Amino acid sequence: MKPLGDSEVILQVEELKVHFALSKTFFFSKYLGAIRAVDGLSFVIRRGETMGLVGESGCGKSTTGQAILQLYRPTAGRVKFQGVDLTQLNDRKMRIMRRKMQMIFQDNYASLNPRMTIGESLSEPLGVHQLATGKQKVKRIRELLEMVGIPPYFVQRYPHELSGGQLQRIGIARALAVEPEFIVCDEPVSALDVSIQAQIINLLEDLQNKLGLTYLFISHDLSVVRHISDRVAVMYLGKIVELANRTDLYKRPIHPYTKALLSAVPIPDPKVEKLRERILLTGDVPSPAKPPSGCRFWTRCQNSTSICSQNEPEFKEIEEDHWVCCHFA
């Protein structure tokens, strides 16, 4: 794990909220409340680190990543990138800023234009940001393909002619085309075979060391996150419930939800796997349109008391760089 204690803070998220309005339309629209996809997140990401963001499907991980890049405009809160509040920028200024911030999508087949060749898809961001023309553009595309381990002749191929792993490499190359400093990796390996996952993870780490990149790595796979991340944030129903460096979180989880998630991760040693206790969560995840009062997790927590349903716990630092949102932490 890289030493990051004195590193520069490149991204600062303060009380970020993203709510989607629910309405019923017949003749007139009627407001029926809101889905609180992201409901008050605060964290920082330091230059050169990889911060993992994990949680169950539907907890708001991907929405958080897209809100940071302003693909979804936040309902409230601030997102500061290198000291600039992105929530205050108009579309024109945000397009200029977005050159420094890119995203790798989970489904790169859906994110690529099926009518464009790979070469055309890679040249598009170069043209939008006026980074290269003519022979310089051709040279840059070859460099990008070489970086991600794709042969140069793939420039004439179309997305449907590539495998899942090759498409993911093209997605990484396209993100790198504008020479960003920060990349949101939104479930970049979840749709790939295990052997291909390892190749993509190693590629991301090599590129980070070579280019000095900073990652927000979103995933539901705790094993993958443990391998690549320096710090890990655990998210539940729109909120971060625990945030710590990788070693502390996996060895000494404190929040009941984190403990339950980690207890489900398989261990290669059969003896250890047989002895450890599996924590089973009861009930379903509540609706983000009507989250529980107090602590979001109390309806599924074995340790909950009356205070959990009445008062929302504070997200507090209980040890150095170890934050937990629990009344009994």
Image (spheres, grey):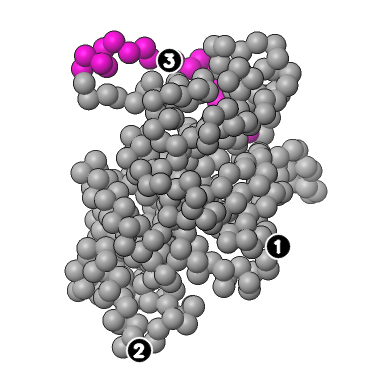
Residue 231 in sight = yes
Task: Tell me whether the residue at label 2 lies in contact with that at label 1, contact meaning CB atoms closer than 8 angstroms.
Answer: no
Residue 100, image x, y percentages: 50, 66
What is the quadrant of the N terminus in the image?
A: top left
Looking at the rendered structure, the secondary structure element under dot 2 is helix
Q: Label 3 amino acid? A: Ile
Res 240 → quadrant: top right
- Report how far apart the C-alphas of labels 2 and 1 lie in the structure: 36 Å
Q: Is residue 253 left or right of residue 145?
A: right
In the image, residue 280 lies in the stretch drawn in magenta: yes
**Which residue is at 23% across, 69% downward?**
146
Depicted 169 relative to depicted 243: above or below: below
The verdict on residue 267 being magenta is: no
Q: Residue at x 32, y 54 (%)?
A: 204
Other residues around mark 2 within 10 Å, as few (<14) / some (14–19) / many (≥20): few
- Helix, strand or loop at label 1? It is helix
* Part of the protein shown in magenta: 270-288
Relative vertical location of residue 107 with respect to residue 301 in this rendering, above or below = below
Q: Which residue is mark 1?
A: 88
Residue on which the image places disc 2? 134
> Which secondary structure is most common in the magenta stretch?
loop
Would you name the residue on which mark 3 appears? 279
Residue at the extreme bottom of the image, as rendered: 134
Q: Amino acid at mark 2?
A: Gly
Residue 308 appears left or right of 6: right
Disc 1 from disc 3: Cα separation:
44 Å
